[in-house]
Amino acid sequence: MPNIYDVAKRARVSAATVSAVLNDSAFVSAALTARVQSAVATLGYHPNLLARSFARQRSQTLGMIVPDIANPFFPEVVRGAEDTAHAAGYTLLIASSDNDLRKEEVYLRLFLAKRVDGVILTKAPGRMPPDLQRAFAKAGVPVVLLARAVPGFVTDAVEMDDKGAAYQGVTHLLRLGYRRVGFIGGLRGASTSRRRLDGYKAALRDSRLRLDPALVVDGDFRIESGYRAGLELLKSRPDAVFIANYLMTVGFMEALRQYRMRCPDEVAVVTCDDHAWLEAFSPRLTTIDLPKRELGAAAARLLVDRIARPGGRARIVRLRNALRVRESCGCALRGADALAR
């Protein structure tokens, strides 16, 4: 395998000149540059990327940890981050924590050992260990939080309007005339879950409706939890339900079938998040569309910018949602007059 000295010999220049051409680290005349590039092509020389990263103090890699890569929400988020990172010259390393703090810490320390230039993190519920925060700060490796906030950890972040998503979905149901609106929440301890519950409560409060604790059940963002929560919630006979994510909605629909109840005739549904295949759902789901791809892209942009310009105050980017009205909310049954109220 040819090395830098072989290239220098063939191009009739010094190894330092070859390095300057390959790394664009100093001015080299056009003639010498052409000779070096010709020698590289002829010999099939490939630079030692690891050595280059040590020399530059950059690995041109970013780490990304998500809670559950099997959740259909996250592949689009990762796609947005990867596209943006690639365009900026970075490679993205991806890990799934399963919302396990110990597993998450293993990946974070591994990323430090691999000398990544920065990390995008959707945090498992719980605090960031202080010694781990210090390790990242000492290494000069910035972290951008994606979707979830972390108590006691001040850093750049990209957030969705979780409270607004639930508020908009529940308010839509209330405008259609439903009054016993249930809520299936996400993973306990996650800031996204807490904010969506806050949005649900705010919508009830603004409509002067009393919160009924029997109409609020926790899930964990997965299908099975939506099923279990649905079986529990339907005992209290809600006339509509807001569900904090799409996967739990799949489970909830199975619970409806167990109760031999129909959506939206007996129980209307609005869920959080939207996917192309929901058009094939029966009934088609009314959703709050979360900006998944832009969420990942915005996090990668923040991180790349922070790597290039360290220091300064932490920045928070908040993205907007969109209501997608379809059949599951019962708008066809309730009529346009209800929405006009």
Image (cartoon, rainbow, N blue to C red):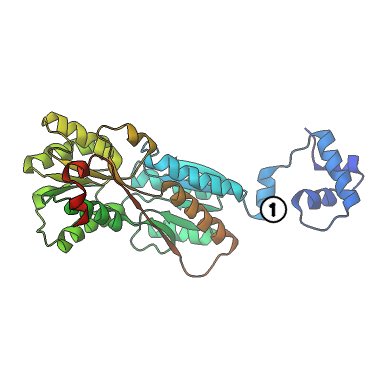
Q: Which residue extends farthest bottom?
A: 312
Q: Quadrant of the C terminus?
A: bottom left
* Residue 178 visible in image: yes
* Residue 148 found in image quarter: bottom left
Residue toward you, 75 or 313: 75
- Does dot 1 land on a helix, a strand or a loop? helix
Residue assigned mark 1: 55
Q: Taking 208 as reference, is 276 left or right?
A: right
Residue 187, relative to residue 305: is it above or below? above
> Residue 269, position in %: x, y?
21, 42
* Residue 167 found in image quarter: bottom left
> Residue 204, position in %: x, y?
16, 58
Residue toward you, 233 or 111: 233
Badge 1 amino acid? Ala
State the residue at coordinates (82%, 37%). Answer: 41
Q: Taking 22 as reference, is 339 left or right?
A: left
How packed is label 1: few (under 14 Cα within 10 Å), some, or many (20 or more)? Answer: few
* Residue 190 visible in image: no
